[in-house]
Image (cartoon, rainbow, N blue to C red):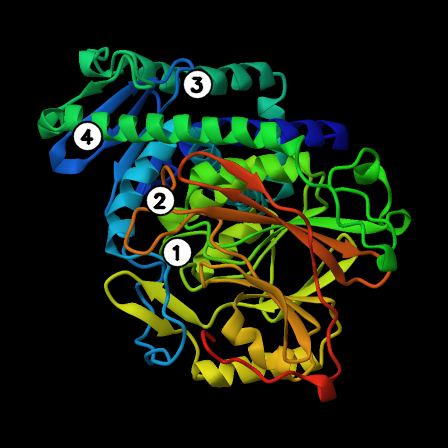
Amino acid sequence: MSSRRRTTCLLLALAAVALVTLPWALFTSRADLTFGPHEAQYRVTADSRLTVDFGPLGELLVPAEDYIPLGLGLHVDIGEIPVSGDDRAEERPAADPDEVKDPGGGSIDALGGDIASYASLFSSPQAQIDQVVEGLSREILTRWALAVCLVTGGLVGLAAFLGSQRLDGIVRALVGKELIGICLVIVLVLTGLGGLVLNRPKPIAADPAFDGTPLAGSQVTGRLGGVIDTALTAVQDFAEDNDAFYDQVLAALRQQWDRRPITGNWTDRGMVPPAGAAGQEDADDSDRAVSTFVFGSDLHCNIGMARVVGEVAGMSGADAYIDGGDITMTGTSAENYCLDVLDDELPDEMPRVIVKGNHDSTETTQHAKTRGWEVLEDSTAEMAGVTFFGAADPRRTVFGSGAQLETELTADQYAQRLRDEACETDFDIMLIHDAAVGAPSLRAGCADYALSGHWHRRVGPETFGSGVRYLSSTTGGALANALTPGPLKMNAELSIIRVDNATKRPIDVQIITVTPEMEVHIDPWVRFPEPLPLVAQPHEDVAGQ
């Protein structure tokens, strides 16, 4: 038999194997993801509906024809709401009792965050959709590739067992019947798919409680029907109030942006163009006087303020976004949507860097990496020609058990180790969640500048040790013992920082404040002081460290 015919037969066999195994991979794949605050498992169905299975409570049935093609559907098995992002972690020693008291929320946030997470399905569904598409696609392709490899490997093994002479005889017997074989395979596949279509469940009986909502046309079964009106109303009211509040905030921001102070062109450092100046964002780093960064911290899953961060990042023409941590409330996998929403709001091509806060987890930062974020983990990252150095906060704060150290070192030992690493690392600006952890590096002259959050109050920019520190207040408006997601309970702040491209030193900072009254204030630029020689260190005020 000619090599050409053998090649043709091989390709036809591979195509047949791929065609036959695709439906199997499609309908047997499972993806362990999240649904709102819940852990959840997703699988593809052929019933053209989204089925959210709450177990004994019943099911939520949503028509899916408009957003899932080819008559396919999706089944979601709802699990528990995780308490910790690392339930298997061993007990850690308690944090230093003398450290700064963590102001980042309490049990109210833990419960209210569940409502906010459900509301995000109304306000920002794309983050959840992207997560499901990515997770299921990865599982389906992996399963499909494995099936093709196993079946093909079996066929190759069978061919080796039969030997070339027997194989040639079988192939000759099949030559001329390729079309029949292909048609047979297609008929088998279509028959299987047709069976799935013919066995679809009864049409959805739309529940009038959903009329006028994004779930219009849906049905609820079982005991869930008895509580759905109250639950849906609470979630929808939250989503509507949240959207209305931040719509008003964004309108005020756009109005104030054109009136913002653009002074602060410090003559001894050269003329500094205002943030967002025309042409600045299109120039190469080497051709510009400054690089512009938007700096936020302690968002605590306030997806409404994520819209504000994205708007400021776009209007300012910033070169990168810098996050000081605590982007979530407890760091569970279900809270990955907190980062996803912010990521979606930022300009697509804008570089972004984050450092883990005590309310985040390694799950949070690992997820950030999958979204293209630079994560500082005893490492450096270059943003617009400026090198940032940082490390994760050594604590892990979980509601109900307080803060625990995630390292064998004490809090003081961890800060000293960070100082030693800073002394041996070449960088321009330190990014660390808690200023107290970065304090030894500034005192030792191993960091000239440090950006932090955690304290939920603004400090600086001011000289500290021989360096300069700046602490951002909470970008999420995270008031202690109050629900952070939703309309603000306290002022939220965001910073725009300009860095001299020649010296790589921060020049000045402009603060944008959003109030609970939906007002936006943009302050004049405040200059960063210069670092001091070690011999000129002022007397240190250790209060609040």
Q: Which residue is depicted at the point 44% across and 39% down? A: 303
Q: Which residue is rendered at x = 63% and y = 26% of the image?
A: 172
Kind of residue sitting beneath label 3: Tyr
Answer with left or right where residue 424 lies relative to residue 278.
left
Q: Residues within 10 Å of mark 3 (few under 14, many from 20)?
A: few
Q: Is residue 397 left or right of residue 259?
A: left
Q: Is residue 265 visible?
A: yes
Depth check, mark 2 against mark 1: the one in front is 2
Q: Is residue 100 above or below residue 509?
A: below
Label pair 1/4, CB-CB below 8 angstroms: no
Residue at the extreme bottom of the image, as rendered = 535
Distance between mark 1 and mark 3 Cα atoms: 30 Å
Disc 1 crowd, CA 10 A, few/some/many (<14, 14-19, 20+): many
Q: Residues within 10 Å of mark 4 (few under 14, many from 20)?
A: some
Q: Is residue 466 above or below residue 32?
A: below
In front: 118, or 299? 299
* N-term mark: 3 or 2: 3
Q: Quadrant of the N terminus?
A: top right
Front residue (pair 100, 394): 100
Which quadrant holds residue 11? top right
* Residue matched to label 4: 231
